[in-house]
Image (cartoon, helix red, strand yellow):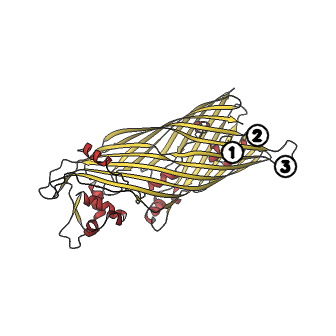
């Protein structure tokens, strides 16, 4: 039966329930940082706030571009591998996703004053860099036997209070989002009107009680959050270095989720009995945004650098487009249709704006001459300042984020040791959960390493990065919020080629 439902579905349409029911997790994935960029940057866990001299370092502290000695360009490719282990009511499942991507390309141009110049601002840098700030490619599969709640509760709970004539006399496209969810359940016999209710606004389920509902949830995500950065920096007397970025963001995410349920509970003598449900959801989120960075680095002595940088909130204007569909196996229903289904064309919703929190980063680096360096970055970001606009339309989620999210610290430590033309690198990264109670979205721990070879006018760098985070993932947003526990492991390999010109 499941194979039949899947074939029926792929011949029809897709959907996503979250387009007009944005969750904190949808916002957080755009607000959290990811370790991206050049191989040298990644191999030291991004601890470059006071180091500079790398195209990706300007994303931490824009003053870092002025540490280049010559015009410089870098192109980077990465292999992303995400492994997700899921545990749902005692059942463990695994899923993986791998992607090859050209994730960074950029250049910086250096302008120097002559040695005899009396101008204290002796060096300027102008840079342009593109990076995938986040790669969203991911695949998560969860399965298990839920002893308590059915998928049908999602549709039943939403339907309560909606007049029956709304579900029978109106077109799907004339309904609001919650009425559409109820329509999908009513159209596939998941629930029926309670005829004893004189107001015709209450309903009963056609899914037999008794628990032991076998359930599966497959979520496939593709897309990216790209960032194009225009950079400017200047050096004052080789002591003070100042910089600024203007960042233009581009978002393109596609998320396909499939929730399946079956049960072998007794068949009802009258009416319909639903023994299987397939609820498919596809969401496209596209948009663009803007942010800026300000940064300063001080070099009190030749071997010590101290940095401070501010990253503004990112203002993203997004549009969601969704398709939705439900298929069921309905036994002994009045229409005699064993496989009711309800699928609909995509709907594009009005644009909305996400404002992510700003970020402060303090940095310190010690340079061991030409032998290497050790660097530490400490960042703070208050996720409770995250907002969705129009505020009146998202008052509930904004209030939730204000109460549930917290100020999160991030620590990045990186080191580099040089042996002639060879550079050996390693790093450590720890990022606190955005939540006050981190069960929903846990802390992140990561380790990195890498090697580079300097050919003189060009350089080749290779990096490996690993990180791990636990989180909860509900199959549906209401009715049955029993979460699967997800452990995600990212293993990425990055190769960069850089050249002086």
Alpha-carbon neighbours of circle 3 within 10 Å: few (<14), some, or many (≥20)? few
Image quadrant where residue 301 sits: top right
Please name the residue shown 35% across and 51% down the image. 14
Element class at badge 1: helix
Element class at badge 2: loop
370 vs 179, left or right, is: right
Q: Are marks 1 and 2 in contact (CB under 8 Å)?
A: no
Image spot of residue 144 (x, y percent): 29, 44
35 vs 142, left or right, is: right
Q: Earlier in the sequence, mark 1 or mark 2?
A: 1
Residue 119 - label:
3
Q: Earlier in the sequence, mark 1 or mark 3?
A: 1
Question: From where the camera sits, is residue 96 visible?
Answer: yes
Residue 83 - label:
none
Q: Are marks 1 and 3 in contact (CB under 8 Å)?
A: no
Q: Earlier in the sequence, mark 3 or mark 2?
A: 3
Along the line of sight, which residue is nearer the eye, 252 or 268?
Answer: 252
> Which residue ends up furthest to the left in the rendered image?
269
Element class at badge 3: loop
Disc 1 to disc 2, C-alpha distance: 15 Å
Up/down of 313 relative to 167, above or below: above
Image spot of residue 467 (x, y percent): 49, 39
Along the line of sight, which residue is nearer the eye, 311 or 159?
Answer: 159
Alpha-carbon neighbours of circle 1 within 10 Å: few (<14), some, or many (≥20)? many
Disc 1 to disc 3, C-alpha distance: 21 Å
Question: From where the camera sits, is residue 48 visible?
Answer: no
Residue underneath mark 2: 302
Image quadrant where residue 501 sits: top right
295 vs 116, left or right, is: left
Residue underneath mark 1: 64
Up/down of 201 relative to 74, above or below: below
């Amino acid at each position: 039966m499941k194979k039949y439902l899947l074939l029926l579905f792929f011949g029809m349409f897709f959907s996503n329930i979250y387009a007009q029911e944005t969750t904190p997790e949808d916002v957080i994935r755009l607000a959290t940082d990811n370790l991206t960029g050049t191989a040298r940057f990644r191999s030291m866990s991004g601890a470059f706030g006071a180091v500079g001299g790398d195209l990706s370092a300007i994303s931490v502290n824009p003053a870092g571009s002025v540490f280049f000695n010559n015009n410089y360009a870098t192109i980077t490719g990465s292999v992303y591998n995400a492994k997700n282990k899921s545990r749902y009511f005692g059942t463990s499942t695994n899923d993986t996703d791998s992607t090859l991507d050209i994730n960074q390309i950029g250049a910086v141009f250096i302008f120097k004053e002559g040695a005899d110049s009396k101008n204290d601002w002796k060096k300027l840098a102008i840079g342009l860099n593109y990076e995938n700030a986040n790669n969203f490619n991911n695949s998560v599969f969860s399965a298990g036997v839920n002893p308590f709640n059915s998928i049908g509760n999602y549709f039943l709970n939403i339907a309560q209070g909606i007049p029956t004539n709304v579900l029978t006399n109106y077109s799907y496209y004339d309904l609001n989002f919650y009425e559409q969810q109820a329509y999908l359940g009513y159209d596939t016999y998941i629930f029926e009107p309670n005829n004893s209710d004189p107001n015709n606004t209450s309903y009963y389920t056609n899914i037999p009680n008794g628990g032991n509902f076998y359930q599966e949830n497959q979520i496939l995500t593709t897309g990216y959050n790209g960032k194009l950065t225009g950079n400017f920096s200047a050096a004052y007397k080789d002591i003070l270095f100042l910089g600024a970025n203007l960042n233009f963001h581009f978002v393109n995410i596609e998320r396909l989720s499939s929730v399946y349920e079956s049960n072998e509970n007794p068949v009802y003598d009258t009416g319909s009995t639903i023994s299987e449900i397939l609820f498919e959801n596809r969401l496209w989120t596209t948009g663009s945004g803007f942010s800026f960075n300000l940064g300063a680095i001080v070099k009190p002595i030749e071997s010590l650098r101290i940095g401070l940088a501010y990253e503004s909130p990112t203002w993203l204007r997004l549009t969601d487009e969704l398709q939705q569909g439900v298929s069921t196996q309905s036994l002994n229903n009045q229409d005699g249709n064993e496989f009711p289904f309800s699928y609909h064309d995509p709907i594009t919703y009005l644009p909305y704006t996400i404002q992510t929190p700003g970020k402060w980063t303090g940095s310190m680096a010690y340079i061991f001459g030409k032998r290497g360096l050790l660097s530490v970055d400490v960042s703070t970001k208050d996720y409770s300042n995250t907002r969705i606009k129009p505020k009146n339309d998202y008052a509930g989620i904004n209030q939730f984020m204000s109460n549930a999210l917290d100020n999160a610290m991030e620590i990045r430590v990186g080191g580099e040791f040089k042996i002639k033309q060879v550079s050996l690198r390693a790093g450590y990264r720890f990022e606190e959960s955005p939540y006050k109670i981190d069960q929903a979205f846990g802390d992140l721990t990561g380790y990195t390493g890498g090697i580079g070879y300097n050919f003189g006018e060009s350089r080749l760098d290779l990096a490996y990065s690993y990180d791990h985070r636990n989180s909860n993932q509900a199959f549906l947003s209401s009715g049955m919020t029993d979460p699967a526990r997800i452990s995600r492991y990212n293993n990425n390999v990055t190769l960069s080629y850089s050249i002086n010109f």
